[in-house]
Amino acid sequence: MYKIIGADQQEYGPVSAEQLRQWIAEGRVNSQTRARLEDGEWKPLQTFPEFLPTLTAFSTPPVFPTGPASGMAEKTNGLAIAGLVFGILGVLPCLCCRPILSTLGLIFSSIALAQTSNHPMQAGRGMAIAGIVLSVLGLIGFLILMLFGMTGGGMRTFHFRF
């Protein structure tokens, strides 16, 4: 007679080998279910040779998890990358088209942020946030320079008239 540890971590049994085969067919246990014969040690059901034909006949293909915990690389959102690049270019002081680049960075990063929020398995959320921050800083910097440029130019004109 066998005993098993269920998915709820509860011990079930004793049950016969035939009952375990039926549970395998029903999908109630699988090859990773821990089991023991009589008072033996707990081990995966796949290590019992008497259950291998049944496990093979009723096994489902393994599901491989994705994400940071699995070690598999996630696909990075392309718009997040583009938004970050435009955001970086938008804060550089030597470029004359800062507002255009910052605006593009803000648009691409905002779309990427929405996409990564809707698809949690897609990477790039941090890049999208960084792109938004840099783009906003680029636009604010441009507006400040425009205000100081206009104020400074106006003051010089005023000063020279009097």
Image (cartoon, helix red, strand yellow):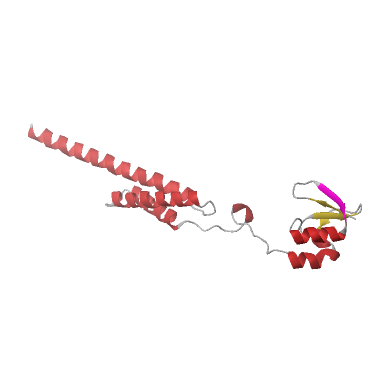
Question: Picture coordinates of residue 96 (x, y %)?
Answer: 27, 52
Q: Which residue is drawn at 36% across and 44% down?
A: 136
For the N terminus, the quadrant is: bottom right
Instruction: Name the dominant secondary structure of the magenta segment.
Output: strand
Does the magenta-highlighted stretch encompass residue 12?
A: yes
Which residue is farthest left?
Answer: 161
Q: Residue at x 36, y 43 (%)?
A: 137
Image vertical order of residue 98 relative to residue 78, above or below = above
Magenta span of residues: 11-15
Left/right placement of residue 98 relative to residue 71 reads left
For the C terminus, the quadrant is: top left
Left/right placement of residue 16 relative to residue 122 reads right
Which residue is farthest top?
Answer: 162
Q: Which residue is drawn at 85% across and 65% down?
A: 50
Location of residue 154 by image quarter? top left
Query: Toward the viewer: 142 or 54?
Result: 54
Question: Picture coordinates of residue 40 (x, y %)?
Answer: 90, 54
Does the magenta-highlighted stretch encompass residue 126?
A: no
Question: Picture coordinates of residue 107 (x, y %)?
Answer: 36, 50
Location of residue 133 by image quarter? top left
Q: Residue at x 60, y 58 (%)?
A: 72
Query: Toward the viewer: 135 or 15?
Result: 15
Count numbered badges in the picture. Answer: 0
Question: Picture coordinates of residue 104 (x, y %)?
Answer: 34, 52
Left/right placement of residue 36 relative to residue 32 reads right
